[in-house]
Image (cartoon, rainbow, N blue to C red):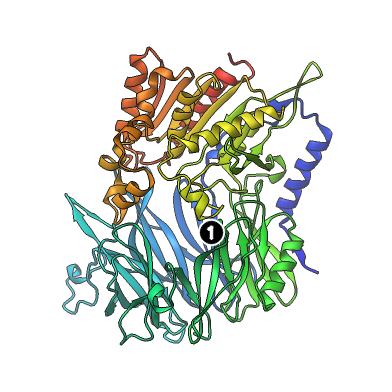
């Protein structure tokens, strides 16, 4: 039996909230209203990694957008070291390289943006906070310090860590992605062949190993650091993968080497080096699955075939590195345990039973596999971290991300399934607020339809969503639908959204809305659309397609003229970006015009709110300005919010506070209890 030990504060908080729900009537919704900041603040305990010997934790913690690093001794919970970033920087990712040292990446708060942007730089720091060193990046060179014996040089490139080289305590293996210069700026668009190098984690001295001949390629290594598999996106935006028997051999595509119709994408080599695991597809719907390749025989074996959803993630066995736990998405926690049965799979099964109804993720483990760090989360739980001892079967609570959130006060996401007008099966979620009564009679809640961004390959998941919870806390029902083009339901479903931005994708949103209204649980006369990025586009396009259905619509960082995707978006600057756009939205000028909300402003009857960042490189603010002008030409008043240092979404807490207060005020005015 697994013993779970939460903190006394957390237990007390949860018991108090459960008691409150039992004692007080849910008809007084105002009494249940939580502070706005509870939903819009960024998390405090972001992630945690355990040291190889299992004695210390390295954790990233956030306060007022400053993300720092702390080291905690596991035996007594004492903070024994750590480090803060320089001004205007944040610590981005952390990884142990031995029992006394970690490496971390940096993100830079650019003067023109409100959020930190990863720089590709790599630092090292010891457990006690000493020997902090910039090891790699565009500011890493030490020649400028006056040293006659320069060891480090500036690198106008970004890097990924490939292998920490357990048998080499002073070096790690990295892959470098050289930058391109566009105008006055260096830009990481991965349009050049990458370089594999060995990097000293104390001095920053670097030695080039080889150049991978595929533009922007990713590679995987075996436990000894050998590189035999690579994958990349070609100029047409297609995934490719290659294999070589050893470093002296030429690379050959996997499809030609093993006689395949297309290349699967390799992601891990097992501990023996005899098998490699890849992402591929299975079945008529082409669901994403994990495929095992026996290198010697060339035999491919899908590890899960009878699946209705894509495999979302794969957790390795702690000893063999073979996939031990496969998680299906995007619905409620559902797992597959490919055989043969392993110790890791048995542990996960026990934990899934102990934390029933929640997602269980193995975040890190000690080298001997005795101590694990777990993340437990759900639709109402933004994430709790536990340290699990596999010998005592005891899970000790560490801390919770967004520690101020009480899961008992959040609202559950109910999975829904319906048929679109053409018979295609659609999935989504409906989140309902607490029941409300007026003079003893139940009142149906107003509905906010929340289309997700992306759109391709992105999906709404059964996971904690702060926007959904905020809206539900304020008395709104929230509908999320995974329309065609969404990820999670197979490649055929994803491709069914190609060139359908304003077509069947919008049909699916409309069909899901009408289906929810038909169930009788929401007030079909008080409905609003709200979305960001593609969701912002969909909010305006759906309002134009069904003008009588919605009272209001909110577009946040949206695209409103599809032609701008080719001219005013950073997508086209990325390697394979133009080919991706041609494949997904097409070049049919008539269709692009027809599918652009800016050309249908006269049809929109709903009240409109537009929110945009002035520095948005993905969907330029020209989109929002054009949409506003088009609406005003038709005598439509537009509620307008812009943010000078925001990019593709607002990050600064003060600005977020204004933004969400404005959205709530807008919703209350048009569909709230006192709305029109």
The x and y percentages for residue 82 are: 47, 64
Q: Secondary structure at mark 1?
A: loop
Q: Quadrant of the N terminus?
A: bottom right
Query: Where, by quadrant of the figure, is residue 292 drawn?
Result: bottom right
Q: Quadrant of the C terminus?
A: top right
Tell me if 552 is positioned left or right of 407 in this view: left
When the figure is inspected, residue 632 is found, relative to residue 162, above or below; the finding is above
Closer to us: 491 or 32? 491
Q: Going 66% across and 37% down the picture, which residue do you hit?
A: 431
Is residue 623 visible in the rendered image? The answer is: yes
The x and y percentages for residue 97 are: 45, 76
Residue underneath mark 1: 286
The x and y percentages for residue 568 are: 27, 40
Tell me if 204 is positioned left or right of 269 in this view: left
Closer to us: 396 or 382? 382
Closer to us: 640 or 91? 640
Query: Where, by quadrant of the figure, is residue 673 drawn?
Result: top right
When the figure is inspected, residue 194 is found, relative to residue 497, above or below; the finding is below
The x and y percentages for residue 448 are: 58, 30
Q: Going 59% across and 76% down the picture, which residue do you hit?
A: 54
When the figure is inspected, residue 628 is found, relative to residue 508, above or below; the finding is above
When the figure is inspected, residue 386 is found, relative to residue 270, above or below; the finding is above
How many numbered discs? 1
């Amino acid at each position: 039996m697994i013993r779970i030990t939460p903190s006394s504060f957390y237990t007390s908080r949860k018991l108090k909230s459960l008691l409150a729900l039992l004692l007080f009537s849910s008809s007084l919704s105002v009494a249940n209203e939580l502070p706005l900041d509870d939903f819009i603040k960024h998390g405090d305990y972001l992630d945690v990694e355990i040291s190889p010997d299992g004695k210390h934790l390295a954790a990233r913690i956030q306060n007022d957008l400053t993300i720092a690093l702390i080291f905690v001794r596991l035996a007594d919970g004492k903070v024994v070291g750590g480090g803060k970033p320089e001004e205007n920087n944040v610590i981005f990712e952390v990884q142990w390289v031995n029992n006394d040292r970690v490496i971390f990446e940096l993100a830079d708060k650019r003067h023109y943006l409100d959020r930190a942007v990863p720089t590709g730089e790599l630092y090292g720091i010891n457990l006690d906070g000493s020997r902090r060193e910039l090891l790699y990046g565009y500011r890493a060179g030490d020649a400028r310090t006056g040293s006659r014996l320069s060891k480090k040089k500036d690198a106008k490139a970004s890097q990924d860590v490939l292998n920490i080289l357990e048998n080499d305590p002073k070096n790690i293996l990295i892959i470098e992605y050289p930058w391109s210069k566009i105008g006055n700026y260096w830009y990481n668009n991965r349009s050049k062949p990458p370089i594999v190098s060995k990097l000293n984690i104390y001095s920053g001295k670097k030695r080039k190993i080889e150049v991978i001949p595929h533009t922007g390629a990713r590679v995987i290594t075996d436990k000894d650091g050998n590189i035999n598999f690579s994958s990349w996106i070609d100029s047409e935006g297609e995934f490719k993968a290659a294999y070589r028997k050893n470093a002296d051999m030429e690379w050959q595509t996997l499809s030609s080497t093993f006689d395949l119709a297309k290349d699967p994408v390799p992601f891990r080599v097992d501990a023996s080096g005899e098998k490699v695991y890849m992402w591929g597809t299975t079945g008529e719907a082409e669901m994403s699955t994990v495929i095992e390749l026996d290198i010697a025989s060339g035999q491919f074996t899908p590890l899960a075939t009878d699946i209705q959803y894509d495999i979302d993630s794969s957790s390795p066995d702690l000893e063999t590195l073979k996939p031990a736990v496969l998680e299906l998405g995007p619905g409620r926690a559902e797992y597959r345990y490919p055989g043969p049965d392993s110790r890791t799979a048995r542990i996960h099964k026990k934990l899934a039973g102990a934390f029933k109804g929640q997602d269980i993720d193995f975040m890190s483990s000690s080298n001997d596999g005795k101590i694990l760090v777990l993340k437990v989360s759900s639709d109402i739980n933004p994430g709790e971290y536990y340290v699990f001892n596999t010998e005592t079967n005891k899970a000790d609570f560490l801390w919770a991300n967004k520690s101020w959130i009480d899961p008992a006060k959040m609202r559950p996401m109910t999975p829904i399934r319906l048929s679109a007008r053409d018979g295609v099966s659609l999935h989504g979620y409906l989140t309902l607020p607490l029941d409300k009564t007026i003079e003893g009679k139940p009142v149906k809640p107003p509905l906010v339809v929340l289309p997700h961004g992306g759109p391709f390959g992105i999906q709404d998941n059964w996971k904690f969503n702060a926007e959904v919870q905020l809206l539900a806390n304020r008395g709104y029902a929230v509908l999320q639908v995974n329309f065609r083009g969404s990820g999670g339901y197979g490649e055929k479903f994803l491709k069914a959204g190609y060139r359908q931005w304003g077509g069947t994708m919008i049909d699916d949103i409309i069909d899901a809305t009408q289906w929810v209204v038909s169930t009788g649980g929401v007030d079909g006369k008080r409905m609003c659309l709200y979305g960001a990025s593609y969701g912002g586009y969909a909010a305006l396009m759906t309002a134009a397609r069904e003008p009588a259905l919605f009272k209001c619509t909110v577009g946040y960082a949206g695209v409103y003229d599809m032609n701008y995707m080719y001219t005013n978006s950073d997508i086209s600057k990325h390697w394979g970006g133009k080919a991706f756009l041609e494949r997904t939205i097409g070049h049919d000028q008539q269709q692009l015009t027809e599918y652009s909300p800016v050309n249908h402003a006269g049809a929109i009857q709903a009240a409109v709110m537009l929110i945009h960042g002035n520095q948005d490189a993905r969907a330029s603010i020209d989109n929002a300005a054009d949409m506003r002008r088009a609406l005003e030409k038709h005598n439509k008043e537009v509620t307008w919010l812009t943010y000078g240092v925001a990019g593709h979404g607002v990050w600064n807490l003060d600005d977020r506070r204004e933004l969400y207060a404005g959205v709530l005020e807008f919703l209350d005015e048009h569909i709230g209890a006192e709305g029109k």
